[in-house]
Amino acid sequence: MQNLRVPLRRLSPGLPLPGYVTAGAAGMDLPAAVSEPVTIAPGEYARVPCGIAIALPVGFEAQVRPRSGLAAKHGVTVLNTPGTIDSDYRGEVQVVLINHGAQPFVVERGMRIAQLVVAPVTTVGWDEVEELPLTQRDAGGFGHTGA
């Protein structure tokens, strides 16, 4: 496990900073920084601010992921999951929530709406070739195993 210090600018006073709820948690909960409740109707989505801006070091990204409790209890999840925050982004962290549930969902200030996972990034350079090495699967695609 790596301990990384990341500069953070608080944009919405009075909210908790993203944090780990348990010692083994991989993701930090992100709070909703809405000034008044936001209702998301079934089938609709909304961009919800989190009240922070961060400066990730080069070589890292932050992934915005759903909270399993919101998905299981309300059918609410992150629309573009995982959302990626690049190391050169300095704007406010926001979450696009979608309501797949049957009832309207109300986002209130301070509500834990998503998780933030910081991870290292590997950059890739391409070596163009005429042929790729063969494998047992080879070009077998979706459903190739019959399951």
Image (tube, grey):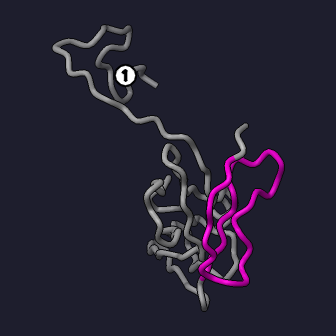
- The stretch of residues the image draws in magenta is 4-33
Residue that lies at the very extreme toward the bottom in this rendered image: 36
Helix, strand or loop at label 1? It is loop
Q: Bin the neighbour count of mark 1 within 10 Å (Cα to Cα): few under 14, some 14-19, many 20 and up.
A: few
Q: Quadrant of residue 89?
A: bottom left
Label the magenta part by its dominant secondary structure.
loop
| Image quadrant containing the N terminus | top right
Q: Is residue 111 placed above or below 127 in the rendered structure?
A: below
| Residue situated in front as seen by the camera: 141 or 101 | 141
Residue 87 horizontal side relative to residue 34, left or right:
left
Q: Is residue 31 magenta?
A: yes
Q: Position of residue 22 (x, y in %)?
A: 82, 53
- The amino acid type found where label 1 is placed reads His
- Residue 76 is situated, as x and y percent measured from the top left of the image, at 57, 66
How far across and how far down the image is residue 11, in percent? 59, 80
Outermost residue toward the left in this view: 130
The residue tagged 1 is 144
